[in-house]
Amino acid sequence: MQALYSQLVAGISLGSILLLAALGLALTFGQMGVINMAHGEFIMAGSYTAFVTQRVIADAGISLLLAIPLGFLVGGLMGVLLEATLIRRMYHRPLDTLLVTWGVSLILQQAARDIFGAPNVDVRAPSWLSGSVNIGITQVPAARLFILMLAAAAVAGLSLVLKATPLGRRIRGVVQNRDLAETVGISTRSTDRLTFFIGSGLAGIAGVALTLLGSTGPTLGTSYIVDAFLVVVVGGIGQIKGSVIAAFGLGLLQATFEYSTTASIAKVMVFVVIVVFLQIRPQGIFSVRTRSLA
């Protein structure tokens, strides 16, 4: 029983990681229909931001807290640059954006190798994140608990922006009907740019968080990009609450399967469950309500 309880806690921890990786993707994919395969490299950029920050500021605790907003800024600026130079020319052409951003991801990986070298680098966790925290009859690593709280804060912050700010109202208006939003004076161009900044910035925060779990390398983002897309698709395109449910659901599902099988078999079983679910409900857990007549 304790082993199963520990496995479920591990599933929640995995779900928080998947949520951080997928949250920004849900925003950009949902509003603009852009399949951004370079999203994983924005995660990688956030990890390297944490590494560089710690090289400048030796104190691990201060550098981590500073790296979180810096990772958001670095990821966001990279996203805006990508959107302004390439993606803005390819709206409504999802296959083209998939191929182009896949090429961009390869370029960014090679750039990381040239700048930081091929071997992976490590970021020291602060002392207050070492050890474990007792929760019920099991223990949870403090670093994973911190990532869970960071994911909850990111969801709360994004929800607040979408529901209580003028930018959020513009984003929701563009999602529901882009043409109608333009006719009432909303600049869809600036809204797209800001949305991409926020979504890519959230990927940077995910990268900072992942440095607490392991080393950082040029291919870090590729380990999470497929799972992040699965979370977005299962949750429903552009649905933040759906992404939350899907991330923790898939995390718990994989942890449950791993309890009686191996990690590889559990991954295959999760994919099978996703395929069956999408056959039954192709729009995902939630669907976007629009006012489009098309």
Image (cartoon, helix red, strand yellow):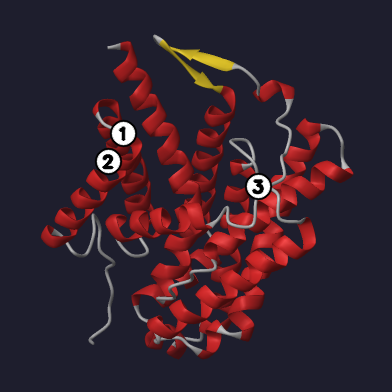
Gap between marks 3 and 1 measured at Cα: 25 Å
Which x, y percent locates residue 102?
51, 74
Sequence-first tag of 3 and 2 = 3
> Alpha-carbon neighbours of circle 1 within 10 Å: few (<14), some, or many (≥20)?
few
Gap between marks 2 and 1 measured at Cα: 5 Å
Judged by depth in the image, the label closer to the viewer, 3 or 2, is 2
Q: Is residue 170 above or below residue 205?
A: below
Which x, y percent locates residue 141?
54, 22
Q: Amino acid at mark 2?
A: Ile
Residue 262 image label: 1
Q: Amino acid at mark 3?
A: Thr
Pick whichever, 78 or 187, lies toward us. Answer: 78
Q: Of all residues shown, which one is farthest toward the left?
A: 280
> Alpha-carbon neighbours of circle 3 within 10 Å: few (<14), some, or many (≥20)?
many
Q: Amino acid at mark 1?
A: Thr
Residue ID at (73%, 22%): 127
